Amino acid sequence: MNELNSVSLTDFTKLADVIWLKETESLVQPARNSGIFRVIPISANSGESRDFSEIDGEEYASVKGQGDQAARGQVQQGYTNTATVRRFAKNIGITYEMRRYNKYPEVVSRLTNMARQIPNRIDLDLSHWLGFGTATTYTDQDGQTVNIFVGDTLALWSTAHTLRSSSSTYRNRLANNPQLSKGALELIERQAIENTLNQFGEKKVIPFDVLWTTDDPVDINTAREILRSTASPSAANEGVVNVYQARYRHVVLPRVATTAAGAVDTAKRKFWGIASTPYSSAYLAIWDEASAQAPAAGSNAEDVQTDDWDFRLRGAWGVTIVGANFLQFSSGDGAA
């Protein structure tokens, strides 16, 4: 369709639907698809919030003497955190002039941009849990205060997270916050080994499978060199095996290094860390997936003041993180 000067509302709606679907299918949502967040659909009429909890059992069995009663295993509920729904919306107008005077590129641009706005906002919200994770709240681009503390009421990136059934604490922020390097990765792995505890203070052995960075090209290249480099068969170090090959999946999160408004925040460009996706307790609760509601013929879809045809974008979701021991972090700025 190259001419819009005679298009009907019905035909235009079909065009919009095709462009919407084509654009949404090609969208990349790095944070949502990272595996760091579990995506949980929430059914209708089930309330405006959803609680998520941790449950821990003991790690080890006990000796049973001959004829003795078996010890009863303890189960401890960990912390609970709540995802509260927030609804997001935007109305996109297609003007009379765009339709009447053959402004096809402008119309397509409006429709493709329309398809991105709700999914992009979801990804921004998820990324800000990591990017603002040194604090317990931040003020978003709409001026609303967003609570981002985890289940123990501390900031996500803390040096003294607490446990429910032990006086022990654990940290998931790397001391001295080094930039990503092979040595720094080994340090954060050691920290994960020594600070992954259950609610009883026992060491948990869990796999960390994601190495995440921002979109800083230096860190992206460093991550690729660490994870993918191999020696040439004719090189002096031939036969040397890269011990990191296949250990991690590298995830680039371009919206971590942003301000609340989504602008570039260079202070966060060196943020990086590792994550255990099988043990994630970060949740994206979806009440309403992104949708576009097109105007219908015979309705009040046409604005009587402007002659615009309005398309309505809608979505509703909430985010929460319960425990912090499946994530490890360095701000990369060398701060003690």
Image: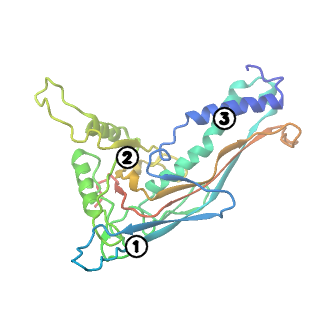
- Quarter of the image with the N terminus is top right
> On the picture, is 231 further left or further right than 139?
left
Residue 334: x percent and y percent? 28, 55
Q: Nearer the viewer, mark 2 or mark 1?
A: 1
Q: Mark 1 sits on what residue?
A: 76
Which residue is depicted at the point 48% across and 49% down? Answer: 258
Side (left or right) of 181 relative to 31: left
Nearest the eye: 49 or 95:
49
Query: Badge 2, how many Cα within 10 Å: few under 14, some, many 20+?
Result: many
For the residue marked with disc 2, what is the amino acid? Answer: Trp
Q: CA distance from mark 3 to mark 2?
A: 30 Å
Extreme bottom residue here? 68
Q: Position of residue 46 (x, y in %)?
A: 66, 62
The residue beneath circle 2 is: 212
Q: Amino acid at mark 3?
A: Trp
Could you tell which of marks 3 and 1 lies nearer the N-terminus? Answer: 3
Q: Which residue is mark 3?
A: 20
Kind of element beneath mark 3:
helix
Q: What's under tag 1, amino acid-wise?
A: Gln
CB atoms of marks 3 and 2 within 8 Å:
no
Residue sitting at x 75%, y 30% = 14
- Do the numbered discs 3 and 1 sit on residues whose CB atoms are within 8 Å? no
Closer to the eye: label 3 or 1: 1
